[in-house]
Image: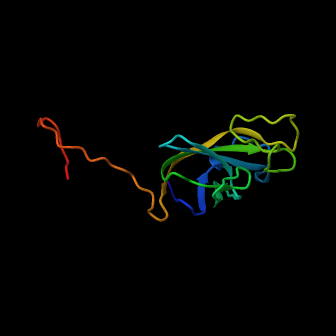
Amino acid sequence: MIQAITETNLEINVQTEDNRIDTSVASTQIRHLFKFTNDLDKSVHYAYAFVENIKARFTEALFVYQLTPNLYAGQINFLPSGYWKYEVYEVSWIGTVTVSSGNAPATEDDVLSPAANDKGVVQGLVTKGKMNVSEKDGTQQVQYTQREAPIENNYIYYGQ
């Protein structure tokens, strides 16, 4: 499980190379599209890493905190805190790798048109997992409503 903190950069290592799909191109022609889904509100954020280093068996990825997320620049804002799911998709290029709008897919289902060597192609899912995002400063609050004690005694009651 990945541990993260709101309003900070996120540096993670994820296993990608054991499940590599497009082995016809070098690692320098591969980038990974990350899909983050919040368990609470079901919001979805996509991002390519700000810095990505593909190693022999895993990928190091750095995401930069930014109040306004940017898919192509590796800028992300994990709010609300809590549990998130992540999925990592392999994207490969035949020609020049350019992670920008129109050259890199924005989602796992995005097919860029017209097809060209400088357009990335999503090859498929290479890994997935869970992530716990903690609060940085503890200002987020969960609100509870206190209820009156039940008259009947067939309840478990935690009061006052």
Position of residue 23 in the picture relative to residue 40 (left or right): right
Scheme by which the image is coloured: rainbow
Q: Give the residue drawn at x 51%, y 47%.
A: 84
Q: Give the residue drawn at x 47%, y 60%.
A: 135
Position of residue 121 in the picture relative to residue 13 (left or right): right
Q: Give the residue drawn at x 73%, y 44%.
A: 91
Say if 156 sits above or below 54 in the image: above
Q: How many marks?
A: 0
Q: Give the residue drawn at x 54%, y 52%.
A: 79
Residue 111 lies in quadrant? top right
Q: Where does the image place residue 48, in percent across and percent down from the top left?
A: 70, 51
Position of residue 29 in the picture relative to residue 142 (left or right): right
Q: Nearer the viewer, residue 69 or 24?
A: 69
Say if 11 sits above or below 47 in the image: below
Q: Residue furthest bottom?
A: 137
Q: Where does the image place residue 31, in percent across and percent down from the top left?
A: 73, 50
Q: Nearer the viewer, residue 123 or 3?
A: 3
Q: Where does the image place residue 6, in percent across and percent down from the top left?
A: 53, 59
Q: Where does the image place residue 24, in percent across and percent down from the top left?
A: 79, 43
Q: Nearer the viewer, residue 133 or 152?
A: 152
